Image (spheres, rainbow, N blue to C red):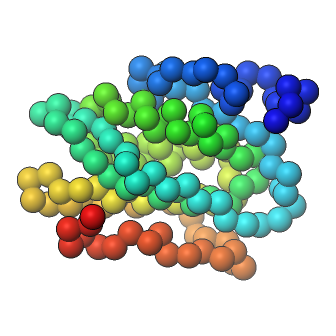
Amino acid sequence: MSDDLQPAGLQLGQSTPLPASPETAQLDRVPNPHADTDYLARFTAPEFTSLCPVTGQPDFATLVIDYVPGDWLVESKSLKLYLGAFRNHGAFHEDCTVGIGRRLTALLEPRWLRIGGYWYPRGGIPIDVFWQTGEPLKGVWLPEQGVANYRGRG
């Protein structure tokens, strides 16, 4: 993207260190060139990590984020850095999953958004967390998230 087309302040095209925490991470948005069309955009993060807030041990998940954009798209490099900032962040699975969905919703004001957090077992129990902004839009192709129920996901 040439400098004259890149909105000011984006991390895209810049050397950007991993943020210290999700709270300090900068999430960027860019204009949606097809804001007049309902379509689904999907981001899958198969190597998401955070820390258990009690033990400090790592937790692992596959996150699937689906959204129908309005006027804004999330800029993917900033999303990658934001998700990476959870690597040293202590939070429960539910807090991570729902918090990410809410932050994206506040930034993008999408027509619809859902997030599925498919967490690997801790203490022998997988915890899967799902959150969405409301009913899916009619007429938008909404594929399954594609993460199997836990049976040794790997």
Seen from this angle, which residue lies furthest bottom?
A: 139
Residue 89: percent from left, percent from top = 32, 30
Q: Is residue 32 above or below residue 9?
A: below
Can residue 127 be seen here? The reply is yes
27 or 135: nearer the viewer = 27
Q: Is residue 87 left or right of residue 58?
A: right
Classify residue 130 by image quadrant.
bottom left
Q: Is residue 113 left or right of residue 60?
A: right
154 or 74: nearer the viewer = 154
Q: Quadrant of the N terminus?
A: top right
Residue 18: percent from left, percent from top = 47, 24
109 or 9: nearer the viewer = 9
Residue 78: percent from left, percent from top = 59, 34
Number of callouts: 0
Q: Is residue 100 left or right of residue 56?
A: right
Can residue 106 be seen here? The reply is no
Q: Is residue 85 above or below residue 17?
A: below
93 or 148: nearer the viewer = 148
Residue 57: percent from left, percent from top = 16, 36
Q: Residue at x 50, y 34 (%)?
A: 82
Q: Quadrant of the C terminus?
A: bottom left
Seen from this angle, which residue lies furthest left?
A: 123
Q: Is residue 133 above or below residue 27?
A: below
Q: Residue at x 50, y 48 (%)?
A: 101
